[in-house]
Image: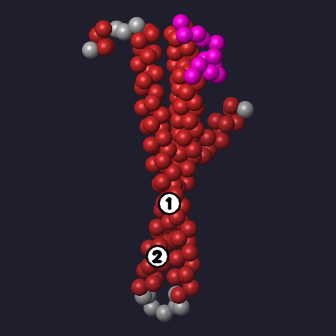
């Protein structure tokens, strides 16, 4: 209904301010998810490494027994966990999402309290403060998207891209 009414710029900025809480919540939820996956994979790597070493010590050269198969399975699981942790970079994704969520939340509090970048605006200049808020939050979100794209790039391209920026 609002799309047909073509709301004013001030109204759209007010709606945007309300949507920011959902954006922050989504970033935090994604950050927690990636942190949880990272921790599980790291735990598997650590426990698997210890189990592999222990089971390898049990292998005395006799015909294959249960521990030979277990050793192979554990080694495979460790390889998979290391591969996924290294490729998807869950820890880095979690860190960047949490950093962006915190920065957006800080902007929202600063706007609500009229401090920081918003202290120069009086109560009659809410539209100007909302314009600055919208721009700053969009800048943060764009930076998050750039970080996400860098994490999705293979290591060779990421190194080349960083050299080009320097």
Residue extending farthest bottom: 62
Vertical relation: 30 (above or below) 46: above
Q: Position of residue 164 (x, y in %)?
A: 68, 32
152 is higher (above) or lower (below) than 82: above
Label 2 Cα crowd, 10 Å radius (few <14 / some 14-19 / many 20+): few
Bounds of the magenta segment:
113-124
Residue 41, labelled with which disc? 1
Question: Any mark on residue 115, and which?
Answer: none
Instruction: Locate residue 53, reporting x and y percent.
Output: 57, 78
The answer to whether residue 102 is above or below residue 132 is below
Q: Residue at x 53, y 71 (%)?
A: 47
Asked if the stretch drawn in magenta spans residue 27, the answer is no
Comparing 24 with 151, the one in front is 24
The answer to whether residue 144 is visible is: no
Do we see residue 123 in this rendering?
yes
**Element class at badge 1:** helix
**Number of other residues with Cα within 10 Å of mark 1, as a class: few under 14, some 14 to 19, many 20 or more:** many
Residue hosting label 2: 72
Q: Residue at x 55, y 14 (%)?
A: 129
**Is residue 122 covered in magenta?**
yes
């Amino acid at each position: 209904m609002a799309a047909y009414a073509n709301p004013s710029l001030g109204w759209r900025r007010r709606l945007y301010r309300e949507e920011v809480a959902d954006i922050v919540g989504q970033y935090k939820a994604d950050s927690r998810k990636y942190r949880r996956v990272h921790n599980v994979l790291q735990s598997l790597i650590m426990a698997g490494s210890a189990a592999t070493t222990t089971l390898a010590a049990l292998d005395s050269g006799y015909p294959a027994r249960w521990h030979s198969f277990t050793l192979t399975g554990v080694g495979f699981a460790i390889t998979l966990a290391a591969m996924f942790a290294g490729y998807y970079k869950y820890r880095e994704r979690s860190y960047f999402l949490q950093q962006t969520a915190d920065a957006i939340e800080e902007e929202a509090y600063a706007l609500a309290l009229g401090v920081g970048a918003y202290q120069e605006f009086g109560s009659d200049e809410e539209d100007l403060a909302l314009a600055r808020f919208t721009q700053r939050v969009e800048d943060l979100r764009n930076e998050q998207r750039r970080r996400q794209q860098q994490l999705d790039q293979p290591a060779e391209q990421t190194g080349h891209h960083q050299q080009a920026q320097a």
